[in-house]
Amino acid sequence: MNLIIDEGNSQIKVALYKGDKQYFFKSFGKDHFEGDFLEELSLKGIKKAIVSSVAKHSRERFAFLQEYTSLPVLHLRADTPVPFSNQYASPQTLGCDRIALVAGGMKRFPRRNVLVIDAGTCITFDFITKKKEYLGGAIAPGIAMRLKAMHHYTDKLPLIEEEDFDTENFVGNTTAKCMLSGVYNNVLREIEGVIAQYKKKYNSLTTVLTGGNHFYLAERIKSTIFAAPFVLLEGMNAILEYQKRI
């Protein structure tokens, strides 16, 4: 059994895989993670583990895994061997979450051009060719970040929380609704425009959508996409499995 741990900006996601099949998944808060984890899961039967983190001091935070067992833990980094050719011009700056997303997209759709869109704190676009060449992509502010930025960088615009905004009614008739339309409607059009760009340049394109806002966006994006909430975890598992073959 493989233990997969993904530490994001707000939560820590934990999964168990045997081969390609997921047997367990749960999101944990960052406070009291060690105690909550050990209460929820037994380390018996786990052969290998991989950790991906966008936060500082992750090695210290997850050191308890080796304190309780001799479990080998792979901390995913930019120089970790992966099952694709990384053509990024500055690979040392590439986030481990994006590496895992690419591996997951490729695992799901081998021999195809794949665009993975992660709609979370930031909206990231990552592209890998059918020849297993990762070329790069784009990073843009996410929905919550855009709402907060308008309030932060102006004197009068209010702070608005995320909501299930109806983009069919995109003409805002209050300041708050104008802000919501400017974020939600524009994010949708932005994503659809990026997908169209890639389709024009690369044939047989498959688009995978994941991230915290993927449920909202998947219902509204008109382009053909595959909603895949666990593609990052699947990518981490694929990277861990790849270590056995090198």
Image: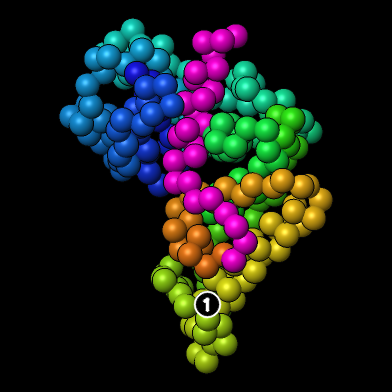
Q: On the rendered structure, is 1 left or right of 93?
A: left
Q: Compare residues 108 and 33 and report the one nearer the observer.
A: 108
Check disc 1 and report its element: helix, strand or loop: loop
Residue nearest the observer in this picture, 163 or 17: 17
The residue drawn where x is 52% and y is 92% is 173
Q: Indicate the position of residue 222 as horizontal and vertical percent values.
A: 59, 66
Residue reaching furthest to the right: 201
* In the rendered image, the vertical position of residue 195 relative to residue 116, given as above or below: below
Q: Could you tell me which quadrant the N terminus lies in?
A: top left
Q: Which residues are magenta?
A: 222-246
Task: Quadrant for the C terminus, please.
Answer: top right
Along the viewing direction, whichever of 134 and 11 lies nearer the viewer: 134
> Which amino acid, mark 1?
Thr
Q: Position of residue 128 (x, y in %)?
A: 69, 37
Q: Is residue 238 magenta?
A: yes
Left or right, 205 with respect to 77, comes to right
Residue at the image position 25 percent from the left and 36 percent from the top = 32
**Residue lying at 38% horizontally and 29% vertically, measured from the top left:** 21
Q: Is 94 colored magenta in this rendering? A: no
Left or right for 198, reference 229: right
Q: Can residue 158 be seen from the camera position used here? A: no
Mark 1 highlights which residue? 167
**Image position, residue 56 (x, y; %):** 49, 33
